[in-house]
Amino acid sequence: MRRLCLVLLWLPMAWLAPAHAQQEADQAPIIAPAEVLEKALDPAASASRAEQDELYLNALRALADGRPNEAAEMLTHLLKREPRHAGAWLDLAISQCELGNAVEAERLFQETERLFEPPASIREVIAAHRASGCKGTLVRTASWMVSAGRGHDSNVNQGPSNPLFGTGNGDIELSPDFLPQPDSYTALSLDYFKPLDNQGTLAIFQVRNRIEDHVSQQNTTTLLAGIERPWQWHNWNGRGTASIGLVRLDSELYQRQSQLQLRVTPPLQLPEHYELTFNTSISHVQYPTRPQYGANTAEFGTALNYRGAHSQAQLAAGSQADRGRDARPGGNRQGWYAGLQWYNQLNDKFTSELGVSRQLWRSDHSYSPGLIDVVRHQQTESARVALLYALQPHHALVLEWRETRNRENISLFQYNSRAFQLSWRWDNF
C-alpha cells in the first residue's frame, strides 16, 4: 500500500518526455514507445477520464490482491488508451517483475524513468524491485497478526437481566448460577493469511482463545480455516470464500460451521472514494451436544464502503433466513441486520475505531408450547469503541470497550453485557 500511495502522489507531477528504449530481439514489448507517440498525437484516441480511473483502480486492486497477470492486462489496455498515465507505466513494470519477466520489467522501468523523470521516492520503489531480481515467486510471503490481552466482562455467561422467569404455570426464580456472572479473562488470537498463487488465491487461518479467571465453564476456543479467491468478469469484481469453523466451549466441542460466501462489486459510477458491494452466503451449523439446534442460514446483503486518506467506513445491511430442524424450539426464523464500521487515523500514533450493529430475528412458531407459549422476537444491539496506539512499526496497544444488549420478548434470554480489554498486537503487515 505504501508503494501505491507513492504512485498516486506522483501522478499529478508526472509529465511526458517520449524516448526510445532498447528491447531484447527475442522478446516483443508489451507496449512500445512508438505507440505512446502515435496516441499522444491523436486526441480522439483518449477514453473518458472516468473510464480510465475505473480501469486503473481495478488494476491496483488486482496488484494488491496478488493478481499481477490480470493487473498487467488491464494496465496494458489502459496505456494504449491513455499513454501519458505515469502510474500505469510504473505498475505495469512492477506487475511484469512480479510475474518473473525480468527483461520486460527492466525495459518498462527504464521507460518510466525516461518518460517521466520520477522523484526520489518512486526511484526507490524501482530500485527495490530491481534488487529483488524479478524472480516471479508464485508463493508470496504470508501475513500474520498475533494479539494477547486482558479484559473484564460484566456478564460472561449471558445471564438474564430478570431473575424471575414467567411460564404458563407462573413465575420461576432462577438459580444464581444462571444469573449474570462477571469475570476477568485472558484473550489470545492469531490471524494467518497465505497467498497460494499469483491469481490472488488466499488461505486463511484464525484462532481465538478466551480463558476466564473463575467461570471456567465459559472458556472458549474458536478455529476458522478457509480459502478466498478473487475474480473478475468484464468490469465486475468479486471474491468467493469457502470456510469451516469450530467452537469449543470449556472441554467440549460446541459448534461446527461451514460457509460459502460470494461478494460482488458492480461497475457503478459512484463519487470518489466510494464503493458498493453485494454479498450472499449460505452456512450450515451443527451443535454436537444439541443436535436439534442445527440449521441452514442464507443471507443477502449490501455494503457501502468509503476509503479516504485518513479514514475508512462501511455501512452494511441485509436480510437472513434461518431454516432449523423440525425439533428446534420456535421453528424457522427470518431476520435482518444493519451495521456501521468506522476507522480514523488521528495522527502518526493513534487510530480510533467505532462499530455499531443491530440484529433482529423473528421465529415462526411459539418457542415451547405449554411452557413458553410465545413466538420469540429477538433484538440484539452491540457497540464497540477502540483506540489503537502504535508503539513502533508492527507493534501496537489496543484499548477497547464493547457493550451488548439482547432485548427480546422472552425474559429468560434477555441480557446485557459490558466488557473492557487492553491488548498488545504484533503483525508483519
Image (spheres, rainbow, N blue to C red):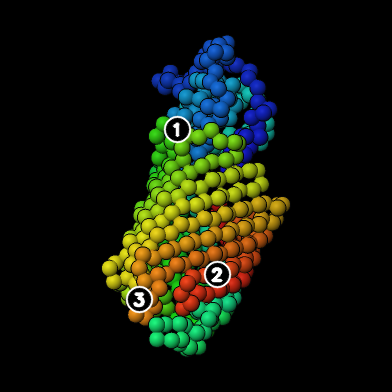
Question: Which circle's residue, 1 or 3, is located before the other in the chain?
Answer: 1
Residue assigned mark 1: 235
Image coords of residue 419 (percent x, y): 59, 72
Residue closest to the eye, 352 or 18:
352
Residue assigned mark 2: 405
| Element class at badge 1 | loop
| Element class at badge 3 | strand
Q: Single out the mark in the foreground, 2 or 1.
A: 2
Whole-angstrom CA distance, mark 3 to mark 2, is 23 Å
The amino acid type found where label 3 is placed reads Ser
Quadrant location of the N terminus in the rendered image: top right
Residue assigned mark 3: 368
Residue closest to the eye, 29 or 389:
389
Image coords of residue 389 (percent x, y): 67, 60
Residue closest to the eye, 243 or 396:
243
User: Vertical placement of 408 versus 79: above or below?
Assistant: below
User: Vertical placement of 325 versus 161: above or below?
Assistant: above
User: Vertical placement of 376 versus 63: above or below?
Assistant: below
The amino acid type found where label 2 is placed reads Arg
Image coords of residue 96 (percent x, y): 47, 32
User: Vertical placement of 228 versus 286: above or below?
Assistant: above
Which residue is located at x 54 percent, y 56 percent? 339
